[in-house]
Amino acid sequence: MQLTMDTAADHIGEEVALTDWITITQEMVDGFAGATLDPDWMHVDVDRSRRESPFGGTIVQGFLMSSLVIYFSHHYRITPVDSAYGLNYGIDRARYLSPVLTGSRVRDRIVLSDFHERGENRFLMKTRHTIEVEGSERPGAVVDWLALMYRGLDY
């Protein structure tokens, strides 16, 4: 589906993308831990996690799960095709519903939740991202993400 600034509101409540599966690797988890200065052993210590974790291995950080909404949104171009650019406006709500083992495959089911004008040539876009985990009935995360979209070059 291709959204435009003028037609996006007509698609509120609709699924705008179902992404392909990606694998969350230990390298991704370690890199995220390094970037966020959060080297919790349940994420980065593979041997200890196998021995001591109730999950039997390392788990993906909840904030890494939230951060994947950016990748999926850009990769699947869910923003209106006539937008000049968008700014991350924040996360309205995030819930981490089940631990996700490192090495799991995840995909994003994206629904347009809201799209309304926020000034001249600016629109607030809200999308719900349900991060599904292959083989699991429960999603790993549900994230309601906000983006401020701009039409033309109106700064």
Image (cartoon, rainbow, N blue to C red):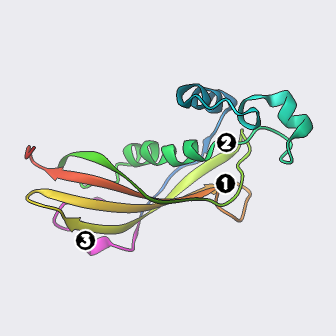
Q: Amino acid at mark 1?
A: Val
* Mark before the other along the chain sequence, 3 or 2: 3
* Mark before the other along the chain sequence, 2 or 1: 2
62 and 71: which one is in front? 62
Q: Which residue has dot 2 on it?
A: 60
Residue 6 lies in quadrant: bottom left
From the image, state whether disc 2 or disc 1 is nearer to you: 2
* Mark before the other along the chain sequence, 1 or 3: 3
Q: Amino acid at mark 2?
A: Val
Vertical arrangement, residue 66 with respect to residue 6, above or below: above
Vertical arrangement, residue 39 with respect to residue 145, above or below: above
**How crowded is the residue under tag 2: few (<14 C-alpha within 10 Å), some, or many (20+)?**
many
Q: Position of residue 87 (x, y in %)?
A: 27, 45
Q: Which residue has dot 1 on it?
A: 133
Please indicate, yes or no, whether residue 82 appears anywhere in the rendered image.
Answer: no
> Callout 3: helix, strand or loop?
helix
Q: Position of residue 125 (x, y in %)?
A: 29, 60
Query: Which residue is pictured at 25% across the width and 53% down the height?
Result: 148
Query: Which residue is pictured at 41% across the width and 43% down the height?
Result: 75
16 and 71: which one is in front? 71
User: Taken as a whole, is the magenta stretch helix, strand or loop?
Assistant: loop
Magenta segment: 1-15
Q: Which residue has dot 3 on it?
A: 9
Q: In the rendered structure, are the residues bearing label 1 and label 3 in contact, judged by CB atoms less than 8 Å apart?
A: no
Spatial distance from mark 2 to mark 1, Cα to Cα?
Answer: 12 Å
Q: Position of residue 4 (x, y in %)?
A: 20, 60
Q: Amino acid at mark 3?
A: Ala
Q: Is residue 13 left or right of residue 56?
A: left
